[in-house]
Image (spheres, rainbow, N blue to C red):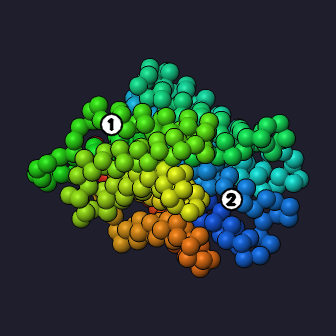
Amino acid sequence: MFTESKPGAFDKPVILQQGFRPFFLLAGAWAVLAMLLWMGSLAGLPVLPAGIDVLAWHKHEMLFGFAAAAIAGFILTAIPNWTGRLPISGWRLALLAGLWGLGRLAFLLAEELGPGAVAVVELSFLFVLMAAIARELISGRNWRNLPFLVLIGLFATGDLLVHLERLGILDAADAGYRLSIFVLAMLVALIGGRIVPSFTRNWLKARGVDGLPVPANLFDRVALAALALLVVAEVAAPDSPATASLALAAGLLHAWRLIRWKGFKVLSEPLLWSLHLGYAWLAAALVLVGLAGLGLLGDEGAALHALTVGGFGTMIMAVATRASLGHTGRPLTAGAGTTAAYVLVSVAAAARIVSPFAGEAALWVSGAAWTLAFGLFTVLYFPVLAGPRVEPKRPDPGTDPG
């Protein structure tokens, strides 16, 4: 884990010393602002520029704004652990954060800039991020983690497909959104498969608890392979019953994978059960996607929101809070505000799932719960992310996401 003892590490502003600092903060703040703009638009308020496709903006910014910032925060923090190299920091990190911000602004000014300029500006962040990741992994000869680069490349390809439709070149926006959503599901499964059982095992062993999480084996590879096949199927044949059946099977496989990690033994520590909860949302959402595709659930949008709001939102919140505390030397325990944020994300997901059946009130509850959750994160973790590291002498193996 990167520490202050490395030469030249802290000759830069604190916020630009490690990737998680600006990008987790940007993800939290944008989760709040983008949701407020979306809900304001639904209420008929002129909070977004005239002429903007509000639904398309909402879908795009939750994926390629909020989730992309969280991905960047995680991967840029994990790479030094994987490679032993110093983190990307200083002006390079500022450049990446600036490109992310320009992308958000460009999409808001789409009418003035035109689709070509918006595509160039908005896509630049993900492609420059990929170049930075490739440089670090290749320089560190860290071939084991190249799949993360491939997945981020596929995520960026989804964004590219959205822009190609906006440019009138290819009718591919729906395929682009599906590709990026299910690639994110794959990232959650890969990252979760490393950190959830690892952190759980460390916590249980430190307390002398018997019955540790089952080590990764052939079953885990089968579960991941099923999800990888689903990524392809959701793009190639999203309406096929075979795709729906595969989603259902993948959800059940990942549910059993989660059960093997003994989450019921860590219910006293929110920093841990939140990770298990995020993975539970992933498994449940895949099951709901399958049921929707088989015609057994009335609304596919509800199933997809179980994945995006429940799975991605909860896991991003869980990883961001734990990494922020651990990588700044703070105690690995969740306070009341952090715990409330975890619960509120699940409230947001549950309310959004039932909103097609429960009416507009549930949609407003979902938006309010999401805004409160990430508002709490942004306020509570601003001093953590923008302030100096504390207790630098205490290494914490539980913060290593690799």
Q: Nearer the viewer, residue 379 or 48?
A: 48
Identify which residue is drawn at 67% across, 71% down. Answer: 39
Q: Secondary structure at mark 2?
A: helix
Q: Nearer the viewer, residue 267 or 56?
A: 56
Q: Secondary structure at mark 1?
A: helix
Tag in front: 1 or 2: 1
Give the quarter of the figure containing the C terminus. top left
- The disc labelled 1 sits on which kind of residue? Asp
- Left or right of residue 278: residue 67: right
User: Label 1 belongs to which residue?
Assistant: 220
Q: For residue 159, which quarter of the picture?
A: top right
Q: For residue 12, which quarter of the picture?
A: top right
- Residue 368 visible? The answer is no
User: Label 2 belongs to which residue?
Assistant: 58
What crowding class fits label 1: few (fewer than 14 Cα within 10 Å), some (14-19), or many (20 or more)? Answer: some
Identify which residue is drawn at 77% across, 41% down. Answer: 171
- Left or right of residue 125: residue 333: left
Q: CA distance from mark 1 to mark 2?
A: 34 Å
Q: Position of residue 395 (x, y in %)?
A: 28, 44
- Left or right of residue 91: residue 284: left
- Left or right of residue 104: residue 266: left
- The disc labelled 2 sits on which kind of residue? His
What crowding class fits label 2: few (fewer than 14 Cα within 10 Å), some (14-19), or many (20 or more)? Answer: some
Identify which residue is drawn at 66% across, 55% down. Answer: 59
**Does 334 sit above or below residue 368?**
above
